[in-house]
Amino acid sequence: MSFCESESETQALEPEARRRGIVTALRAKNGTEFALSTHPQRWLLGSSATCDLVLDDPYVSATHCIVERRTGGSLLVRDKRSRNGTLIDGNAVEAAELPVGARLAVGRTTLVAVAAPDGRGPAALTSLRGRDPAFLGMVEQALKAAQTDCNVLIVGETGTGKDLLARVIHESSRRANNGFVPVNCGGIPRELIGSELFGHEKGAFTGAHTDRDGYFVEACGGTLFLDEIGELPMELQPHLLRVLESRRVRRIGGASERAVDVRIVAATNRVEHLGTESSKLRLDLYHRLATVVLVLPPLRERMGDLAELVHGMLAELAPEHGMKSLSDAAWKALAEYRWSGNVRELRHSVVRAVALGGDTLEPEHFFQELRMTWSRALDDVPNHEPLVPYERVLRGAMERAIAAHGTIRAAASHLGMPKSTFADRAQKWGLLPRERPRLPISERPRSGRKRDEVGDGEPPADAEVDVRRARGAGEAPGPVRSR
Ligand SMILES: Nc1ncnc2c1ncn2[C@@H]1O[C@H](COP(=O)(O)OP(=O)(O)OP(=O)(O)O)[C@@H](O)[C@H]1O
Ligand SMILES: [Mg+2]
């Protein structure tokens, strides 16, 4: 099957509401859908005629990425060292899950992951669980703010629900029927972010072969969610401030401005110095974004919500696995754990337990992977390189951080370590996934890998690896072949 999208169309996809369920097709702007079977299988996407899904886009590499159906139904996308990268919801990824409603961008083509018509699930508000008074007070504020057009800044540790809350605000606002456009300011290569946000004119920089609208225009009438706003490069912050003040956007390299009717919700987990001169976010921009500030409490500060959260997750998993219950020992273990990865880490743990356990889940089902990783990893350490106790502790913390956060950047930031130091130590101690040898396409298996095989030596399903280093920092984006 072959898709061809004209350049002007790629940035104007119809908004697709977030839905739960299994992705059953990739939909292009013109409505064409590429159906994806629900059986374990792989599809190769690229501009080469040998691909399963052929994309007629000069910015797409011959074999650009692989989409893989895994046992259980989830879809995994792997970049195949493409020249211009593979993005999910604006994040450059090396390997990551593609959920329903997510936007897969390859070259200048954007495809929306859609579910079968009956896959519609609860809206964000009904997914949001918790009765803790502070949490409920914050949700009430969010719903009030949703009724206005004011800018909202959501602050909270990783996994506390910033993304979910941003969707709640959008869905509860007058903009609900228009687009919710999420942009991860920390996930887009630095040299691309200006063009992604504001668009560019043909010839504005090397590789800008056509005019292009940015996310501001795409979000017109809807909500622009600027995630990880603290990662926005300093030099772009005045530009963003101007757009927020004037509500007009000018493409990079352009002369004229265009009015944009967009509500901004921003989020950050970098609370240090927020709202002070020492913050990475300019003070004037902070004040512009923080008309309403919503602070999401970490899970350890609302452990009264643990049971409701776990029961909700068990109920979501019940159609596939049957309704499970927890032993007293399991509840105790969950209550005593610190959950530094917050609700996301809890969800991963529950999913793991449901997959591994019987009808009654025990503590080892929730934490088994960590224990196995810990003991196996320590066994792997060569005898001639004994670890001193401090290093053993650090290594364990790093392993848990990788398991909980999925990316080197997030894990390093969680431990307050410089990313380079984290990466060096993780490399030295063998904590990183190994590279797979690259085979010609013809020699690669096309389908039917078992779940256990997927993880062998490869990034975990939810890993989002910063591909800037992998592709070479500073490499200018550009067409892959001339037409
Ligand atoms: N109150 C909640 N009720 C139910 N599920 C929740 C709640 N908060 C978070 N979750 C779930 O936890 C997971 C992580 O949430 P989310 O992605 O919104 O966190 P985040 O704060 O944006 O994290 P990050 O800073 O890493 O981007 C999601 O699966 C989300 O649905
Ligand atoms: Mg988030």
Image: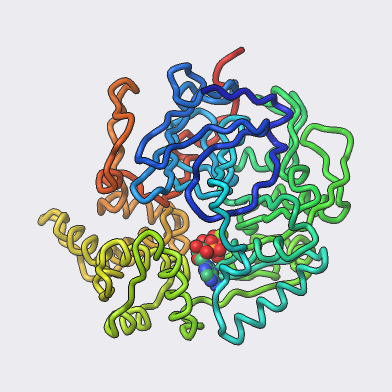
Q: Which residue is pictured at 80% across the width and 53% down the height?
A: 262
Instruction: Tell me if I can see residue 157 in this picture.
Output: no
Estimate the x, y position of residue 329 in percent, counting from the top left. 27, 83
Residue visible at 57% across and 65% down in the picture:
269
- The quarter holding residue 142 reads bottom right
How far across and down, in percent of the image, does residue 170 sit?
71, 61
Taking 427 as reference, is 328 above or below it?
A: below
Q: Is residue 207 visible?
A: yes
- Residue that sits furthest to the top in the current view: 483
Which image quarter is the C terminus in? top right
Q: Is residue 476 above or below residue 290?
A: above
The answer to whether 193 appears left or right of 324 in the picture is: right
| Left or right of residue 184: residue 198 | right
Q: Is residue 220 above or below residue 477?
A: below
Instruction: Work out which residue is located at the far left of the displayed protein and give it.
Output: 383
Q: In this rendering, would 268 be left or right of 70?
A: right
Q: Nearer the viewer, residue 435 or 462?
A: 462
Q: Nearer the viewer, residue 363 or 108?
A: 363
Which colouring convention does the figure follow? rainbow
Q: What residue is at 86 percent from the left and 56 percent from the top?
A: 245
| Residue 316 x %, y % | 45, 65
Quadrant holding ligand 2?
bottom right
Percent across and percent down for residue 226 are 67, 55
Relative to 180, residue 5 above or below: above
Q: Residue at x 81, y 65 (%)?
A: 150
Instruction: Give the mark count.
Output: 0
